[in-house]
Image (cartoon, rainbow, N blue to C red):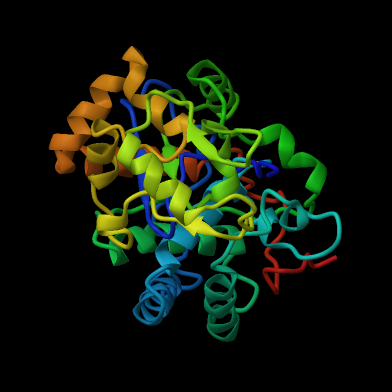
């Protein structure tokens, strides 16, 4: 089966939100022109509208938080946090195979429609996406925190930009670190997003009779059996698997506890435990959820500040799926 690369640590989890965040070693990316309460005067209800939209959508579909979190990662890792992943059309980021399984677009569109009624041409899609992902964490039981706003929307979205900014599921830790460093990040933000069966198929061997067996010794044997049952040979790449079936829709530290039991879904999950540079943080987060939550807030702030457009750069789209032209 063809592997579908995912932006950012394809250490993925279905519809849930956990990220591997390390100590902040690098300064925040360019965010000098962002500010807290940016819309206090121009659109004071902006954050309220986004938060309510996320909560309403989540009450109907508990997978929404995970989709929004994954969506913001796919946006920010490719040419910065400018909502370029939301633009529809042939040859756009959204059309690339790495992004075809993304979801949560309707939530962003709903919030944008409301804001265009109350504050036309004021709130960017990039800010709506960042705020929605932030609120998704709280909606799923995670920490609440403030982030600065003032991002503007990008005018350009090309599929050709996607693959050079993504991390493959089979990457080594050094390869993952290299990609993160190019974004101004260190050993932070190893996000766990929705996984495709094809993303972990290279941890198994298929013999001449078509029988699959485990070849990755870092994976727990019983967990490997479960994966082979859920994703048999020939399974569609649209089939997804819970990396944390115990608390799939809750933002917590269960992911790290799974890693300690050698139940990381992907190779890029397992390497977090086997690599001495990251193991200590896995161990810490596995027993200290408060520490994870605190690190998450700092890491999310860094993520949503990557290569932001501010001032007169970009535009404020009228519709998030279309550039103003």
Q: Establish if 174 lies above or below 324.
A: above
Residue 280 position (above or below residue 263): above
Residue 125 image offset from top left, x and y in percent: 60, 64
Q: Is residue 184 left or right of residue 64?
A: right
Is 286 left or right of 237, judged from the image as shown?
left
Percent x, y of residue 91: 85, 54
Name the spot of residue 28 as percent of width and height, x first: 45, 31
Image quadrant holding the C terminus, namely bottom right
Looking at the image, which residue sits at the far top?
276
Whether residue 153 is visible:
no
Q: Residue at x 79, y 51 (%)?
A: 156
The one of 297 and 150 positioned closer to us in this rendering: 297
Is residue 116 visible to the viewer in this orientation of the structure?
yes
Residue 9 versus residue 234 in the image, above or below: above
Vertically, is 111 above or below 195?
Answer: below
Residue shown at the point (37%, 37%) measured from the top left: 264
The outermost residue toward the bottom is 117
Q: What residue is rendered at 64% in x and 36% in y?
A: 166
Left/right of residue 180 with respect to residue 145 in the rendered view? right
The quadrant in which the N terminus is found is: top right
Q: Nearer the viewer, residue 280 or 305?
A: 280
Q: Residue furthest front?
A: 209
Rendered image quadrant of residue 271: top left
Q: Position of residue 280 (x, y in %)?
A: 24, 20
Q: Nearer the viewer, residue 171 or 93?
A: 171
**To which quarter of the image does residue 20 belong?**
top left
Total of numbered circles in the picture? 0
């Amino acid at each position: 089966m063809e592997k579908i690369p995912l932006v950012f640590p394809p250490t993925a989890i279905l519809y849930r939100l956990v990220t591997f965040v390390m100590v902040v070693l690098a300064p925040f990316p360019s965010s000098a022109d962002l500010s807290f309460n940016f819309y206090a005067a121009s659109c004071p209800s902006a954050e309220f509208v986004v938060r309510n939209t996320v909560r309403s959508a989540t009450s109907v579909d508990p997978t929404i938080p995970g989709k929004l979190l994954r969506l913001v990662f796919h946006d920010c890792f490719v040419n910065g946090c400018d909502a370029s992943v939301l633009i529809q059309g042939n040859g756009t980021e959204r059309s690339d195979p790495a992004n075809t399984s993304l979801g949560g677009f309707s939530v962003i569109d709903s919030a944008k429609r409301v804001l265009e009624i109350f504050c036309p041409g004021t709130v960017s899609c990039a800010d709506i996406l960042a705020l929605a992902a932030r609120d998704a964490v709280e909606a799923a039981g995670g920490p609440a925190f403030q982030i600065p706003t003032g991002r503007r929307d990008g005018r350009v979205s090309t599929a050709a930009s996607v693959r050079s900014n993504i991390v493959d599921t089979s990457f080594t830790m050094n390869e993952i670190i290299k990609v993160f460093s190019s974004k101004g990040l260190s050993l932070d933000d190893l996000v766990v997003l929705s996984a495709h069966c094809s993303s972990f198929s290279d941890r198994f061997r298929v013999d001449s009779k078509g029988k699959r067996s485990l070849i990755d010794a870092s994976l727990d044997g019983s967990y490997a059996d479960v994966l082979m049952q859920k994703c048999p040979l020939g399974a569609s790449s649209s089939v997804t698997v819970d990396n944390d079936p115990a608390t799939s829709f809750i933002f917590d530290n269960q992911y790290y506890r799974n890693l300690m039991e050698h139940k990381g879904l992907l190779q890029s999950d397992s390497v977090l435990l086997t690599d001495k540079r990251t193991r200590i943080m896995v161990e810490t987060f596995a027993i200290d959820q408060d520490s994870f939550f605190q690190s998450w807030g700092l890491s999310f702030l860094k993520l949503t500040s990557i290569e932001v457009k501010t001032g007169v750069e970009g535009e404020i789209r009228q519709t998030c799926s279309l550039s103003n032209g």
